[in-house]
Amino acid sequence: MAVGRRDKAASFRGSRIVVAIVIGVLLGCVIAFLFPYGLFNPAASVQNRRIGKTNFQIGSSSCESSERSKMLKSEIVSLSEKNSELKKQVRDLTERLQLAEQGKDQAQKQFLVLGEQHKAGPFGTVKALRTNPAVVPDDSVNPRLAKILEKVAVRKELIVALANSNVKEMLEVWFSSIKRVGIPNYLVIALDDHIEEFCKSNNVPVYKRDPDAGIDAVGRSGGNHAVSGLKFRILREFLQLGYSVLLSDVDIIYLQNPFNHLYRDSDVESMTDGHNNMTAYGYNDVFDEPAMGWARYAHTMRIWVYNSGFFFIRPTIPSIELLDRVADRLAKQLNSWDQAVFNEELFFPSHPGYEGLHAAKRTMDFYMFMNSKVLFKTVRKDAKLKKLKPVIVHVNYHPDKLRRMKAVVEFFVNGKQDALDPYPDGSE
């Protein structure tokens, strides 16, 4: 009996083993069918998560609210504005870097010339370097302006004037005189929309700058001095593009082509506020101080200022530095007069605490480039001088500008000999 029970127990255990094996095989088949890449394969797990995530995103996108869309649009606009500001900063930094490189290049060129050792020639034959080299043109500074200047300028030179609606009548007399002489290379920088349209309607070359809050506010409503101060900031781009500019106020009558009367040997060539040889070109002025006894007489040098309303400026490093210096001071010293600052930067020498500008300058012939003091105080009263035909007449000394401009046209263009007679030497 005991043997029989042991045989049955062994047989039962063997049956359970067989059943377990069969179940294991069946589970393996099921798993192999359901998980062909393996039950613990990470790729399959990732794929399943992706499918789940995609399904979730599709469901989420389809349910996205309009409020979320507005938020996204607002963020895009904000990012675009930040991107524009960053682009502007990059452009400004690039511009400074390019100018620094140009300055370095010009300095190296001058060193190559000046660095060579030369023996001095015979007496009276030694000449110093007078004319600075031009900067390398950079069209990336203002591509739109570059295209305009390419069409307007002649031999990379042109007359430039700034104007707003306050000087519309004078502007018309100004460009009419230019057209009469036949000067092709001139450009008006319109400081407001009305002047831009006015120039276009009269076939006058015109350029309106891209919006600039600081410049536009002054340009639209500023008076003569305020507008005049803007030119030092605006002209910089012209020089960087490689163009020489004959800067002109609009209270000027053109009687000849000024480009036929320039020397082009200096950084700045300017008309003078002087009215004779001494005041225009400089003189030795003796200061008397009796209390000093034997040393009572002190010699000083004097010259009347250059007129910042009419000057020819070449595209050189010293010229650009001059514009930067004047613009910087005018921005910081709000009550400064642009003409005074212009002359101080041109003439003041280096001294302790101050590095002077190393720019070459030339004074224009005061009879050819005539100011209104010379005309009304001297020329009109002299029979020989009345026969002169100046290049320009600048009505800078008198406030009744428009009337005197028309009188100048009558006298020099229409030959009316008494056209200047009704006006006093000075202002009324």
Image: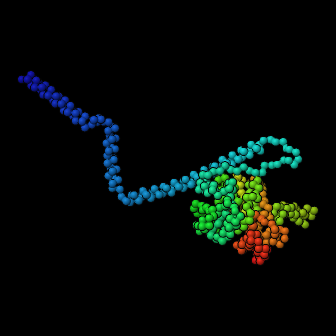
Residue 309 pos. (x, y %): 71, 64
Residue placed most toward the observer, 396 or 175? 175
Q: Is 219 above or below relative to 123?
A: below
The colouring scheme, among rainbow, by chain, secondary structure or one colour, is rainbow
User: Is residue 372 found left or right of 65 in the rendered image?
Assistant: right
Report whether 371 appears left or right of 69: right
Residue farthest along the top direction in this orientation: 3
Residue pictured at 32% horizontal, 44% vertical: 51
Q: Quadrant of residue 157?
A: bottom right
| Place of residue 92 in the rendered image (x, y in percent of width and height, measured from the top left) | 60, 53
Quarter of the image where the C terminus is located: bottom right
Q: Is residue 233 visible?
A: no
- Quadrant in the picture for residue 223: bottom right
Looking at the image, which residue sits at the far left? 1
Residue at x 20% of width, y 31% of height: 25
Q: Residue at x 12, y 26 (%)?
A: 11
